[in-house]
Amino acid sequence: MADDRPSPTYPHDAEPPQHTALLTEPRDGTPAPIVDTDGLREYSQLLSSGTGPIAVDAERASGYRYGQRAYLIQLRRVGAGTALVDPVPVEDFSPLAEALTGPEWVLHAASQDLPCLAELELRPTKLFDTELGARLAGFERVGLAALTESLLGFTLEKHHSAADWSSRPLPENWLTYAALDVELLIELRYAIATELERQGKLGWAEEEFAALVNAAPPAPRVDPWRRTSGMHKVRGARALARVRALWNVRDGLAAKRDTAPGRILPDTAIVAAAQGDPKDEAELFLLPMFGGRSTRRLSKLWLDALAEVRELTDKDLPTSSAPSDAPPPPHRWAEKEPEAAGRLARAREAVTTLAAEYGLPQENLLTPDTVRRLCWAPPEDADVAGFLRRHGAREWQISITAGALENALSEPAPATPSEDDPAAPAGS
C-alpha cells in the first residue's frame, strides 16, 4: 500500500508538529504472526540483512496469566519490515537471538519488556529506551502515543494495551495495534536522540542504556506476600501469618493453573479473611468476595490454611516487617535520629533544586532510596562519590550531585553571636 506519510527530517528541531494524524495501520499492512521455527528463521535472515537499529516490543497478559511471559513479540528494521512473532508455538529462538545480537534495540520502557524477552534467551547488546530518553530530555508526557504525537505528528490508538494477549487466535485489530507499536519507534529514537544531544544529555542517556543492558537479573523478592494490597489494615503477627498462608495457597493455585493470582482470590478478600479469621464456611461466605461460586468451591483450601495458622507457635509467626538493610521510613527519623533527618531534608532540597535546573525528574537524577541510605549512614571516609557509585549511580549523576550532597551531609555551622546580639553571653 502507498505510504503518504511525511518522512521525519533530522536533525530534529524540537518544535512540535503543527498538525497530527491518526495512524490506523502499518505502512506495509499488518503481517500475519510467525508461528514456527522455519518462519522465524526466514525473518531472522531478513533482520540480519537489514540496516540500522531494530525496534522491539512485547505483549504480555498481565492480569490474566501467572508470570510475565511474552505472548507476542513485535520487530521492525529498515530492509526487513515488521514481523509479529507468536512465541507460544515457536520451539527454537536461536536464529532470532543471533540476528538480534549486535544491532541496537529500540524499546519503549525497556525495563518492562527485557525480563520476558530474556526468558526466551533474547538479550540486547546495546539499546535505546525512548521512554527513558524522553524523561532525561524533560518531556512531561513520555507515553509512546504522547511522544509520537508531539515529536512526529502521528497519534496512536492505545485501545488494547490491557488485553489478554494469551488468547488465541488474536483478533486482526489487536495485531494491527501491536504492529503500530514498532511502526514509529526508530523515527522516534532519532528524534529523542537529537533532542538529548541538543541539551547536552546524550552521553547521560547512553550511560543509562548501558546500565539497563548490563543489569543483573532481579533477585527473588523477600516475603512477596507482604505486597498484598491493603496490608496496612492488618494488625498483629498472627493476622500477618493468615495473609501469608492465604497468599501462598493462592500463589500455588495460580502457578498450577497459569492464572493471575487476583483472578483466583483478590487481595481484598485475603485481607478481610486475615482480619476476620473465619472458622467455618458460614463465617467465610459472609466475607466480601468469598460468596462467588468459584471461591466457594475452594473454601476448604482457605479454611485449612487459616486453621494451620492457629496451630503456629509464636516463634513461627512473621515479624511486623520483612528483614531489610534499608533505613527506617523517613517519617520516623526526626524522633529516632534528628541529625539524619536534617541531612535528609537538606539532601532532598539539593536534589530537587538540581533536578529543576537540569530539567529532569528527581528520581532520574538520583533514586530516592540512594539519597535515604546516604543520609542515614554517611560514609565514614566522606567519599560521597564512592558511596553513590557503589549504590549504582551513573557517572553523570555523580558529577552533578556529589558536591551538593557533600554539603548537605555537613552540619550547618552554628551562628556566631555578635556583640550587638542581646542573647550573647556576657563578656563575649
Image (spheres, rainbow, N blue to C red):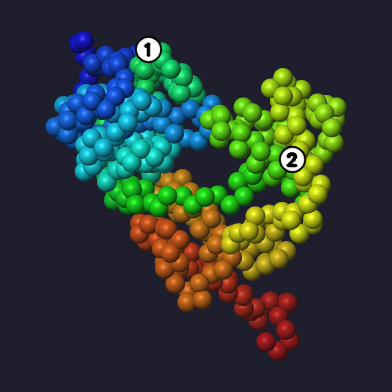
Q: Is residue 151 visible?
A: no
Q: Position of residue 260 (x, y in %)?
A: 57, 30
Residue 155 on image: x %, y %: 37, 20
Which sits in the foreground, 120 or 158? 120
What element does badge 1 sit on?
Answer: helix
Q: Which residue is mark 2?
A: 305
Q: Is residue 94 left or right of residue 313?
A: left
**Left or right position of 265 against 196:** right
Q: Residues within 10 Å of mark 1 (few under 14, many from 20)?
A: few
- What amino acid is at disc 1? Glu
Quadrant containing the N terminus in the rendered view = top left
Residue occupying image coordinates x 22% and y 19%: 6
Q: Is residue 353 above or below residue 418?
A: above
Quadrant of res 345 = bottom right
Instruction: Give the residue drawn at x 82%, y 28%.
Output: 281
**Mark 1 or 2, nearer chain start:** 1
Quadrant of the drawing holding the C terminus: bottom right
Residue at the image point whose x is 32% and y is 25% from the top? 85
- Crowd class of label 2 (few under 14; some 14 to 19; many from 20; radius 10 Å): many
